[in-house]
Amino acid sequence: MKTQYYTAASLDGFIATEDHSLEWLFSLSDINQSSYPEFIEQVGAMAMGSSTYEWMLRNADTINAQMGSPWPYTQPVWVFSHRVLSKIPHANIHYVQGDVREHHQQMIAAASDKNIWIVGGGDLAGQFYDAGLLDEIIIQVGSVTLGKGQPVFPRRVLSPALKLKSVQQMGEGMVELRYDLTNN
Ligand SMILES: NC(=O)c1ccc[n+]([C@@H]2O[C@H](COP(=O)([O-])OP(=O)(O)OC[C@H]3O[C@@H](n4cnc5c(N)ncnc54)[C@H](OP(=O)(O)O)[C@@H]3O)[C@@H](O)[C@H]2O)c1
């Protein structure tokens, strides 16, 4: 079982524009031709911040068209927020806040030997990293730049550097980088 931050970023390190748009991403790759189907098969629990969750609420139609459902996850999802968020009927969602360590234990129990996916954003992934709970970072780097936006991983990681485990080209539009953090 691993705790993995799996995301897509622009070449200059942003996972969304300043106004939380992902339009730049959709033209770069077909999710069904990526590592995603194999990746999600191994995910037993997930975590996301409120901006990511609210993006899913706002873009339910797009998600439905791409994934066949506006809330395409069968796995339990922990949504982090200090606010009361709109609920999605029948979705298996835990609305939580505070120290990620307290919730990680519950995610492990719920994932039953599968992996835990930190969906994003970058700072939430950073909170798991700060607590020593992040095992892998998997980033699809798109061949575009945004100039500004929501950062992929707003942390300083210098020494030891991350260990690059694999590089997978996905056409001309993307490259997937996998980093192992287990000895960081
Ligand atoms: N490119 C990709 O593949 C990809 C993947 C994932 C997400 N995204 C996009 O990237 C953007 C990420 O937005 P973001 O950087 O703002 O990150 P986010 O993690 O989605 O949301 C951050 C917010 O979550 C809440 N939060 C975070 N940690 C918390 C904690 N420990 N306890 C309680 N609340 C906590 C806080 O808001 P409140 O307390 O005010 O609720 C915080 O401002 C979104 O637009 C999303 O759609 C892109």
Image (tube, grey):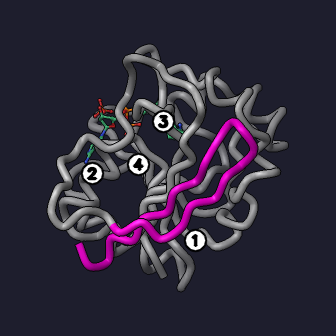
Disc 2 from disc 4: Cα separation: 19 Å
Residue projecting furthest to the bottom: 113
Whether the residue carrying mark 3 lies under 8 Å from ligand 1 is answered with: yes
Mark 4, residue position: 95
Disc 4 from disc 3: Cα separation: 13 Å
In front: label 2 or label 4: 2
- Label 3 amino acid? Thr
Q: Disc 3 or 2, which lies upstream in sequence?
A: 3
Mark 2, residue position: 126
Which residue is located at x 81 percent, y 50 percent? 32
Query: Is the stretch drawn in magenta largely helix, strand or loop?
Result: strand
Instruction: Estimate the x, y position of residue 125 in percent, counting from the top left.
Output: 34, 52
Tell me the crowding category of disc 2: few under 14, some 14 to 19, or many 20 or more residues within 10 angstroms, Cα based. Answer: many
Image position of 19 (left or right of 44): left
Q: Disc 2 or 4, which lies upstream in sequence?
A: 4
Q: Any mark on residue 44, and which?
A: 1
Tell me the crowding category of disc 3: few under 14, some 14 to 19, or many 20 or more residues within 10 angstroms, Cα based. Answer: some
- Label 4 amino acid? Tyr
Instruction: Estimate the x, y position of residue 155 in percent, counting from the top left.
Output: 21, 46
Q: Disc 3 or 1, which lies upstream in sequence?
A: 1
Q: Where, quadrant-wise, is the C terminus in this rendering?
A: bottom left
Disc 3 from disc 1: Cα separation: 19 Å
Whether the residue carrying mark 1 lies under 8 Å from ligand 1 is answered with: no
Along the line of sight, which residue is nearer the eye, 143 or 126? 143
Residue range of the region highlighted in magenta in the rendering = 163-184
Seen in the picture, residue 86 relative to 32 is either above or below; the reply is above
Which residue is located at x 20 percent, y 54 percent? 157
Disc 4 from disc 1: Cα separation: 17 Å
- Label 1 amino acid? Gly
Mark 4 and mark 1 residues within 8 Å of each other at the beta carbon? no
